[in-house]
Image: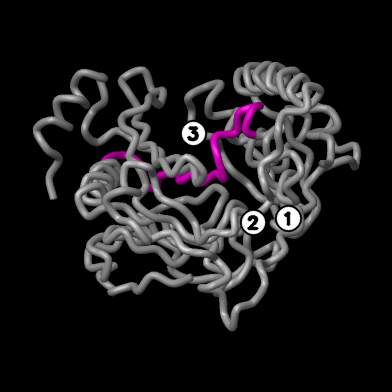
Amino acid sequence: MELSRELLSLLQQKRMPKHSPILVRIFKEESELEVWKQDVTGHFQLLKVYPICRWSGDLGPKLHEGDRQAPEGFYTITSQLMNPNSNYYLAINTGFPNSFDRANDRDGTFLMVHGDCWSSGCYAMTDEQIGEIYSLARDALLGSQPSFQIQAYPFRLTPANLARHRTNPNMDFWKMLKIGNDHFEATRLEPKVAVCDRRYVFDPYQPSNLSQPLVFDPTGKCPAFVVNPKIARPALEKQHADEVEYEQLVKENVSVAPIYSGLDGGMNEVFLARLPGRIIPLAMVLTNGAELPQLPPVPWTDNDGSLANKFFGALPKSASQRFVASD
């Protein structure tokens, strides 16, 4: 499928070469998927926002096969994960479980961004939407970009949203994701992602006093690393400003969102009237009427005095194969 004349015109207006890299961001609560694309300056700019037709589960990461959770985290998409012959029109496999998921004993298969507006652990778009997203990804992979990044979040990680969800047991996990989010939003550069000590680390850089290359073991102790000041400085400034706003909102005792919605996922409001009855109680679709899964926070805070921790300061705890989408 080729890009439409309208989309090619938009690329030209935004000074984005057709084959320049892309980056995808997904927000569950808002039911939106963003496609960002690199412009001629080398930075990513927002190209287009797509309303998500359907996602399943609830806010929070995917833990195990069968929980119907759509994944959250940072995923690297290569051409091998692009499926033009999907049962759901076209599909992009997120690659779940990634090294972070495996290090935390999470499992599941074939978690996709696909068409057909039907989801069992996936992010489902309309066929027209996935055709456009798939084409943008294909063109980027045909360029100099061997892969592109999907960042999947529970919601936009603003101070207001974090304050609303402050009692959620996944908050530590979401605060970890926010570090990568802040790196991207502060610089408009794709964050480099590594995993060690069962947690994500972002934009790690080898200290000048160490000659050995950095090696990251997803389940082992994190090596000493620093972050390029050109990335760390604006990211830390954003983090500090967000923390001040968050603390003020908590002080004002803003209302708290329920930990579980009780519903099986969601869809963007533009589809609700068009497709009634697609959102049903989650308990009805879980095996044997099981109770809603408890989602404990994933420990990730590094308080061991490593060089990385000293840099940032102590962080508070708080192919042509026909794939069938799975849950």
Question: What is the total number of numbered labels drawn onto the structure image?
Answer: 3
Which residue: 71% across, 38% down? 256
Disc 3 or 1, which lies upstream in sequence?
Answer: 3
Given contact means CB atoms under 8 Å apart, are the residues at marks 2 and 1 in contact? yes
Residue at the (54%, 47%) spot, across then down: 74
SS state under label 2: helix
Query: What distance separates the C-alpha of mark 3 from that of mark 1?
Result: 21 Å
Q: Residue furthest bottom?
A: 288
**Corner quadrant of residue 309:** top right
Do labels 2 and 3 touch, CB within 8 Å?
no
Q: Residue at horizontal 50%, vertical 46%?
A: 28
- What's the mark number on residue 39? none
From the viewer's side, name the closer residue of 293 and 269: 269
Q: Which residues are magenta?
A: 143-161
Tell me the residue that label 3 is attached to.
190
Q: Is residue 215 visible?
A: no
Check disc 1 and report its element: helix, strand or loop: loop
Residue 166 appears left or right of 280: right
Residue 87 lies, in percent from the top left, at: 26, 71
**Label drawn at residue 100:** 2
**Amino acid on which the number 1 mark rests in the picture:** Arg
User: Visible in this render: residue 252?
Assistant: yes
Which circle marks residue 198 in the picture? 1
Please state the horizontal and vertical placement of residue 63, each as a whole percent of the image: 63, 65
- In front here: 228 or 252? 252
Distance (Cα) linking label 2 and label 3: 18 Å
Mark nearer the N terminus (2 vs 1)? 2
Q: Nearer the viewer, residue 86 or 79?
A: 86
